[in-house]
Amino acid sequence: MDAPPEMIAVDVPRKHYDPAELGLLAHIYRGEVYRSTIWRTRLDQTTNWAVVTTGLALSLTFAGPSASALPLILVGLLVVVFLMFEARRYRYFNVWRARCRLLETDVCGPLLRGEGVRMDGRWNTLLAQDYVRPRFHISYVRSIGRRLRKNYAYILLVQAAAYYGKLAIHPVSAHSWQAFLDRAAVGPIPGLVVVLAGMVFHGTWIAIAIATYVYERRVRSHGSLISIA
């Protein structure tokens, strides 16, 4: 015998989260904020190392009339190593940052406007997939470009200015181009080779910073922060 129509259960798709699920989302958000804060601290550590070592190299290079400019060359390479460490850490930080931002825009924002949190199939699906299959949301090269534009470009610019300033004016002004190149020589390596290598070195990081900036401007308007690019 068939059940009366009023007894038939209708599977109506849910559109909003219940209070218990909202509480879970609150705990998820708190956890992601904590993780992003921890990784933000780790980013600051590598930047501090780069600043301290650059300052030490400046002190050694300008310590006296006979001091060599070699510490500034070596510190430039060391700063690149710190940059690579920090870019790797930034990829992890960006995972937690993207999740926090998604929760802020699609959970906190609607709640504060009194609209409730809807299961719209977009943000919640993105977040669920990111938890089930976690992955980086930014490439290693893009992370290098971001850290360059935020911090390391300024450190490397100071290093470059100090190095070429050392060659040009310390302890006295170089009276000719040949005198400048003679100061730049490192052991058996001619000064011209050292100067050209420095120009290539600084030109490379400038090109990376600009190229990644142009690329990010192009893709910034496409989709969520939780994506591979």
Image (spheres, grey):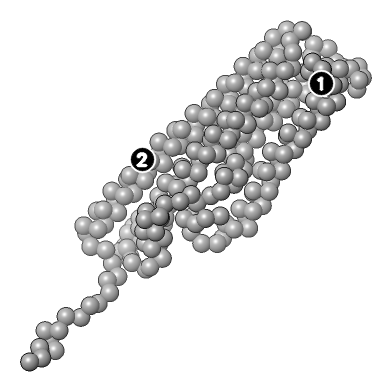
Which picture quadrant has residue 3? bottom left
From the viewer's perspective, tell me whether residue 148 is left or right of residue 200: left
Res. 127 visible in picture:
no
Residue in the picture at 64% in, 53% down: 215
Callout 2 secondary element: helix
Q: Nearer the viewer, mark 2 or mark 1?
A: 1
Q: Which residue is mark 2?
A: 34
| x, y percent for residue 116 | 30, 64
Question: In the displayed structure, would residue 118 be above or below residue 177?
Answer: below
**Type of residue at label 2?**
Tyr
| Mark 1 Cα-neighbour bin, 10 Å: few <14, some 14–19, many ≥20 | few
Q: Which residue is mark 1?
A: 189
Residue in the picture at 65% in, 35% down: 153
Q: Residue furthest bottom?
A: 1
Callout 1 secondary element: loop
Which picture quadrant has residue 47? top right
From the viewer's perspective, tell me whether residue 33 is left or right of residue 66: left
| x, y percent for residue 189 | 81, 21
Residue in the picture at 62% in, 28% down: 79
Quadrant the C terminus occupies: bottom right
Which picture quadrant has residue 22? bottom left
Q: Residue furthest left?
A: 1
Quadrant the N terminus occupies: bottom left
Residue in the picture at 64% in, 48% down: 212
**Type of residue at label 1?**
Ile
